Amino acid sequence: MATGRGQTTLERRVYGVVRRIPSGRVLSYGDVGRLVGTGPRQVGVALRRCPDGLPWYRVVGCGGVIRTPGETADVQRQHLMAEGVRFRGKRFSYAAYRWDQSR
DNA sequence: AACATGACCTCTC
DNA sequence: TGAGAGGCCATGT
């Protein structure tokens, strides 16, 4: 059921941050949560809404791991590789591709 | 108002 | 290095 508003304030904040992630860069659920002032799980719930045009695939699990369930995981990996992320098996170096806002 | 759920994270063995 | 258990906290019922 809709709550009246299409999305909550928290969701809008999450989307706002995710939208700012540049191509070829990634951010973990935990980091996004830090930025918007909430926990990692809430970020996952928010991204599950997945609005059109949102680069949701640039949000990954800690340590450069795809935490997305089902076939969506493959889609995400394809998107990331297309932006230059080089996977090492099923993981990639999160430290190397992490979006550093200060730069 | 209370309970169950979840695209997570961190600590321990 | 890898696997398991606990903790968190907003959302939906």
Image (tube, coloured by chain):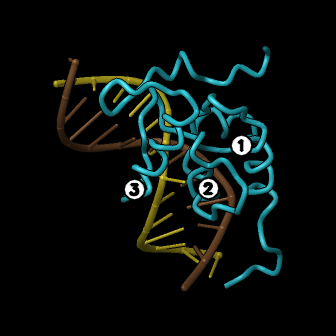
Chain colours: A cyan, B yellow, C brown
Looking at the rendered structure, the kind of residue marked 1 is Val
The reply to the same-chain question for discs 2 and 3 is yes
Q: Is residue A5 left or right of residue A37?
A: right
Camera-nearest residue between B6 and A69 = A69
Residue A14: x percent and y percent?
73, 48
* Same chain check for tags 2 and 1: yes
The chain carrying label 2 is A
Q: Earlier in the sequence, mark 2 or mark 1?
A: 1
First in sequence: mark 3 vs mark 1: 1
Which tag, 2 or 3, sits closer to the chain's start? 2
Q: Is residue A84 left or right of residue A46?
A: left
Which chain is home to disc 3? A
User: The numbered mark 1 sits on a residue in which chain?
Assistant: A
Q: Quadrant of the C terminus of chain A?
A: top right
Q: Residues within 10 Å of mark 2 (few under 14, many from 20)?
A: many
Q: Which residue is mark 3?
A: A69
- Confirm or deny contact between disc 2 and disc 1 (CB under 8 A): yes
Q: Is residue A43 above or below residue A48?
A: above
Looking at the rendered structure, the kind of residue marked 2 is Leu
**Quadrant that contains the N terminus of chain A:** bottom right
Identify residue type, mark 3: Pro
Please tell me whether mark 3 sits on a helix, a strand or a loop: loop
Residue A68: mark: none
Gap in Å between the C-alphas at discs 3 and 1?
Answer: 19 Å
Seen at 41% across and 35% down, the residue is: A65
Categorize mark 1 by other alpha carbons within 10 Å: few (<14), some (14-19), many (20+): many
Residue at the disc numbered 1: A18
Residue A73 in percent (x, y) is at: 41, 50
Foreground of the two, A89 or A81: A81
Badge number at residue A47: 2
Q: Residue at x 42, y 41 (%)?
A: A66
